[in-house]
Image: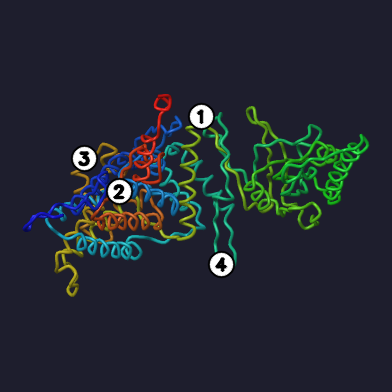
Amino acid sequence: MFGGGNSYQPVMVLNSNTKRDQGKKAQFSNIFAAKTIADTIRTCLGPRAMLKMVLDPMGGIVLTNDGNAILREIQVQHPAGKTMIEISRTQDEEVGDGTTSVIILAGEILAQSEQYLRQGLHATVVIRAYRKALEDCIEIMKTKASIPIDIKNREEMLRVVKSCIGTKYLSRWSDLACQISLDAIETVMVDDNGRREIDFKRYARFEKIPGGSIEDCCLLKGVMLNKDVVHPKMKRRIENPRIVLLDCNLEYKKGESQTSLEFSGEPDFTRMLQLEEESIHAMCQEIIALKPDVIVTEKGISDVACHYLAAAGISAVRRTKKSDNNRISRATGASIVNETADLKEEDVGTGCGLFEIRKIGDEYYTFFEQCKNPKACTIILRGANKDVLNEIERNFHDAMNVTRNVMLEPRLTPGGGAVEMALSRALDTMSSGEGITNDEFFKGVEKYPYKAVSRALEIIPRTLIQNCGGNVVKQLTTLRAKHHQQADQFTWGIDGETGQLVDMHKFGIWEPISVKMQIIKTAIETAILLLRIDDIVSGTKKASTLTDGSGQGDGKRKKEDDDSKPTDESNKS
């Protein structure tokens, strides 16, 4: 028990293998991890961004400057570092662009909060100031730092997409990439009773074909499959085809589990083969009755069915993906049918103008093109090797997301760090009490961390200047002065190519407001989340306990049991 007097022995509540960080130590640990992740990809921002080469666990190479693609391949141990990687993935899923910016901004906001925590300011006070700054940023961006856009004006839309492509590997071919991205989104867009739906992840497919040059990339307003017809005598080119889509096997039904048949004589075996052939013939006759020209099925087609279909002049493609079948259905107007007995005339698709099999390189490809009203498309990518093709696909993905965001929310903010500097100036003005008389918030200590958000926002223009080798102090001071002179100077930003100050309105660099709002929301909310953590408990297990038992006690007990067992030598003795 305890000793006499007031001397108590320490009581171990947690396991001896458990590592624990508490209070300020935990907060500073999280801030350091966030800053490290941000510094890793800081050079990947802007048109002069450097590429990162990351080796994945399988030995493959990822060559990219996309923040999400880089962080996805990095193995991180620190829990706060994993949270930072998660916000990059969230940004990519929500708006598709700004994955690098959100990490840099979140890291800088946390770095700015460090000095206040060291000075003894409570984390709750800092969080309250950050929440107020976030609300003000959103309000300012919606009302003062953005302009509306006419989405029917193709020139303006191309300019927006070009500002996204300009920081990517595809920037040299930006005109071609912008045209393809905009046409793809316009193809898959559906207006249904005033509700606009743009589901390009499902209905726009990337077909990557190594070889050729990037200039050979094109948009096919239809569907392309890496398939060939199943019989050599089937037609490989049909104009205005009647198309039937199936989700069933064109072969005899096999038993679900192991099936055994016993035959008493040879005629029985012949009769069974005949029944199989008759069942396939009946299925084929149900299809032939509709007089289609092309059949596409997700399942298999037997050799006997191939013979009947080829004899009827019908071309067949088998074992397509479910997603490909859905795209063909949307492009041609055909309905996917689960049983041949259910086929009706209205299930036949007649919206396709040309069905053709072409050979590209060593592979055969099936084309459904010249569709009357294609609501699905295929983007054919050509390039030197797989690494280049993967990077081009990521770039197109970002560009198409930007186009979709503008279509759904047609407001733009200036790029090149202009909107960040405008927000920084506005927050700085508000925290200084200029123009505000009755706001009690700015009379307390909260105004200092509120001002820290203003300083943190300058990291975007600063990083742009650094990455193109400009004079950071001179250009940033000049840009700050520009924004402070007049409130309507919110379009002045940094030219990422040269590091000089330019008016984004004349320069033509605009970004969707949804991307910028998501960046600021995610960055500040992540900083708040990590600042609220004041205790990190990491329970480490030995390698043996993972296999010996479910818990540490189980492993130790099992080891003791093994030691107490008699060995072969003791049995012999």
Question: Is 361 situated above or below 516?
Answer: above
From the viewer's perspective, tell me whether residue 491 is left or right of residue 269: left
Q: Residue at x 78, y 49 (%)?
A: 242
Numbered disc in front, either 4 or 1 = 1
Kindly check if marks 4 and 3 are in contact, taking CB atoms under 8 A apart as contact: no
Circle 4 SS class: loop
* Residue under label 2: 80
Q: Quadrant of residue 267?
A: top right
For discs 4 and 3, the disc positioned in front in the rendered view: 4
Residue 484 occupies quadrant: bottom left
Q: Earlier in the sequence, mark 4 or mark 1?
A: 4
Q: Mark 3 or mark 2: which comes first in sequence?
A: 2
Q: Give the foreground label among 3 and 2.
A: 2
Q: Residue at x 20, y 49 (%)?
A: 28
Q: Which residue is mark 3?
A: 471
Q: CA distance from mark 3 to mark 2?
A: 33 Å
- Dot 3: few (<14), some (14–19), or many (≥20) neighbours within 10 Å? few
Residue at x-position 40% and y-position 44%: 68
- C-alpha distance separating marks 2 and 1: 36 Å
* Structural crowding at the residue carrying mark 4, measured as other residues with C-alpha within 10 Å and reported as few (<14), some (14–19) or many (≥20): few
| Disc 3 residue type (three-letter) | Asn
Mark 2, mark 1: which one is toward the viewer?
Answer: 2
Whether pointer 3 and pointer 2 mark residues with C-beta atoms closer than 8 Å, the reply is: no
Q: Is residue 451 left or right of residue 416?
A: left
Q: Amino acid at mark 4?
A: Gly
Q: Tell me the mark number nearer the camera, choosing from 2 and 4.
A: 2
Horizontal side, residue 255 vs residue 447: left or right = right
Tell me which amino acid carries mark 2.
Ala
Q: Secondary structure at mark 2?
A: helix
